Amino acid sequence: MTNDVKISDAAVVAPLKKRKRKKIASLDRRKARAGWIFVLPFLIGFVLIYLPMVVQSLNISFSEMVTEGDQIVYKFNGFTNYQEALFVDLKYIPTLLSGLANLAFELPAILIFSLFMAVMLNQKMAGRAVFRSIFFIPVILCSGIMDGWSNNELSDKMESGSIDDGSGQNATDDLVSAMDLQMLFSSMKVGGELVIYVTQMVNNIYNIVNRCGVQLLIFLAALQSISPAIYESCKIDGATGWETFWKITFPMISPMILVNAVYTIIDSFTSSSNPVMEYVLSPEVYDQHLTRSTAMAWIYFLIVILVVALIALVMSAFVFYQRKND
């Protein structure tokens, strides 16, 4: 009698599990279709508009410009432009190294500052929305919307990271000396490399704040997605704020740290103030040696891809992804 009951229960439960799995699979398919529909306009534009330009640019980088009559013809010359860019041009390699050095400085500074401000602005306080808007204003001012305003002088000032105090000098140059930050760190017996890095970061604080608006919003969204019940459980268990941050907050937002790192790398490498971009598009290179300039751009592109892949590979080992139970 008992065996009959067990068999009947199994016969009832099995179809229910199959129906549940079918519903989950159907929901996943609908989400996948919605995702493809969402990116479809970009894919169409990429194939019809952007991809032909990429192919043409790649073709130019392997060619030389030859004048035949009244026309300019591109003839294939192999890797000559790439060899000239790497071994003939004396400024390209130092400029590349300078761009990588700027990235090594700016990446941790922007991520740390934007995460710190996101944690602060996620607290309950008066005027929280106003402060969030203030930090996002530089993103709007440096966007293409402002291009028509006085030749975008405001955007150029913000990109340069300089503040004129009325005397013709940059007011941010004397920031560290006013605070006597170096003497402070010397009294704390901190290593000289850390002193140099912190002083450079303080002197460059204007540019860091100017470029952390998008990262700050992404971190805010990640912080607000964490369930308050988790923090309540930590308080009940007697965890301190420091322990809660490193054991709960930091692991939960680690995927967004990876996203912001990739975004910051791309934004830094494609910024108009980037030394490599300035050199590749400068009149002495672009106007006089178009094919070599194109080859430099492709070398730069490959370096960007390698840096992004390396950072993503290293950081993905420390990223925590929350999985929901089935």
Image (spheres, rainbow, N blue to C red):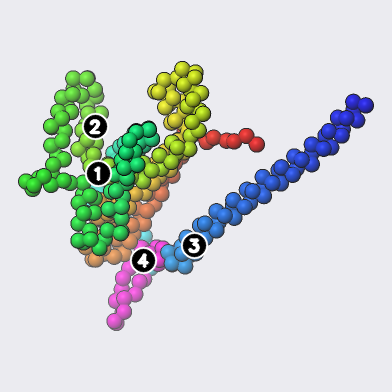
Where's the C terminus, which quadrant? top right
Magenta residue span: 51-75
Residue at x 24%, y 33% (from the top left corner): 197
Q: Is residue 58 above or below residue 128?
A: below
What amino acid does circle 4 point to? Ile
Does the magenta run of residues contain 201? Answer: no
* Closer mark to the observer between disc 3 and disc 2: 3
Of all residues, the one furthest to the right in this rendering is 1
Q: Which residue is under mark 3?
A: 41
Q: Within 10 angstroms of label 3, few (less than 14), some, or many (20 or more) residues?
A: few
Instruction: Identify the mark nearer the N-term, 3 or 4.
Output: 3
- For the residues labelled 3 and 2, the Cα–Cα distance comes to 44 Å
Query: Residue 200: image x %, image y %?
Result: 21, 36
SS for tag 4? helix
Q: Which residue is under mark 4?
A: 60
Q: Is residue 142 left or right of residue 170?
A: right
Mark identifier at residue 37: none
- For the residues labelled 4 and 2, the Cα–Cα distance comes to 43 Å
